[in-house]
Amino acid sequence: MLKIDNVSKIINELTILDSISCDLKDGQIVALLGPSGSGKSTLLRCLSRLTSLSNGIAIYNGTNINDLPASKIGVVFQSFNLFPHMTVQKNLTYAPVKLKLMSENSAKEKADDLLTQFGLQDKSDQHPAQLSGGQKQRVAIARTLMLDPDILLFDEPTSALDPEMMGDVAQLILASKRDNRLIIMATHELKICQLIADHILFLDHGKLVENCSKTQFFENPTSMRAKTFIDKMKL
């Protein structure tokens, strides 16, 4: 379980996250939903430890997230962040070999298995510039899964893709789900939430407005702000 307790982020006297508290269970796909500027990407960056908290604490299964090994938290970035000078296979194997978590042969074997699983077995020796947006997204997800993280974070996983690719990416995220893994995705798109999310955290102006199941959020949200957001996004 991830326990987020009174978490705030303040930048240049501007409150980006305002005293957020919630408990998130393993085995779920949690959608951080909200309009641009709501704080969802900032919360994701705090959980990924790319930026520090101003106040509060986040505890995962009894351990402060700041004390978790690097391999325990995986991030799939909005812009993919693949190494352009490396082949697809090297993008996957670099971190586990560099961190001495796998031998080069073991890493290559796991990379080949993941690339086959993601339908990219023929792209192993290509470079990111030779791939489509959807292929880059799949490589980015596969690279993150190389370290078998307990917490898997996605930042706007479909924003850089053609809308027709949303279903494919959603299925890849769903395939990454397991009982002892927590998946959190920051998004502003309702469709991917409806497809695969179990739980919704709806943020607005840095505040946690809704903390509920997907069914409750879409069928009976408690706040007028969430109702307005859902109505506008359906247009």
Image (tube, rainbow, N blue to C red):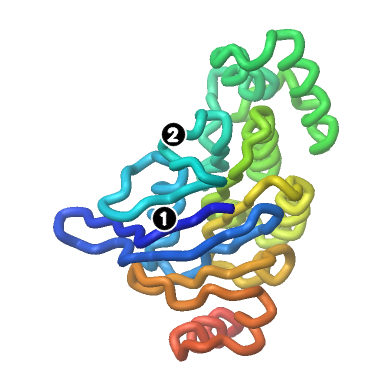
Q: Position of residue 192 (x, y in %)?
A: 67, 65
Q: Residue at x 57, y 20 (%)?
A: 95
| Vertical position of residue 119 compared to residue 191: above or below | above
Number of marks: 2
Q: Marks 1 and 2, how far apart in space?
A: 18 Å
Q: Position of residue 133 (x, y in %)?
A: 64, 43
Q: Is residue 5 left or right of residue 105?
A: left
Q: Is residue 123 left or right of residue 205?
A: right
Q: Quadrant of residue 98?
A: top right
Q: Is residue 14 left or right of residue 233?
A: left
Characterize the local packing of mark 1: few (<14), some (14-19) or many (20 or more) Cα atoms within 10 angstroms.
many
The one of 135 and 28 positioned closer to us in this rendering: 28
| Vertical position of residue 33 compared to residue 226: above or below | above
Identity of the amino acid at label 2? Asp
Identity of the amino acid at label 1? Leu
Q: Position of residue 220 (x, y in %)?
A: 61, 89
Q: Which residue is mark 1?
A: 43
Label 2: element kind:
helix
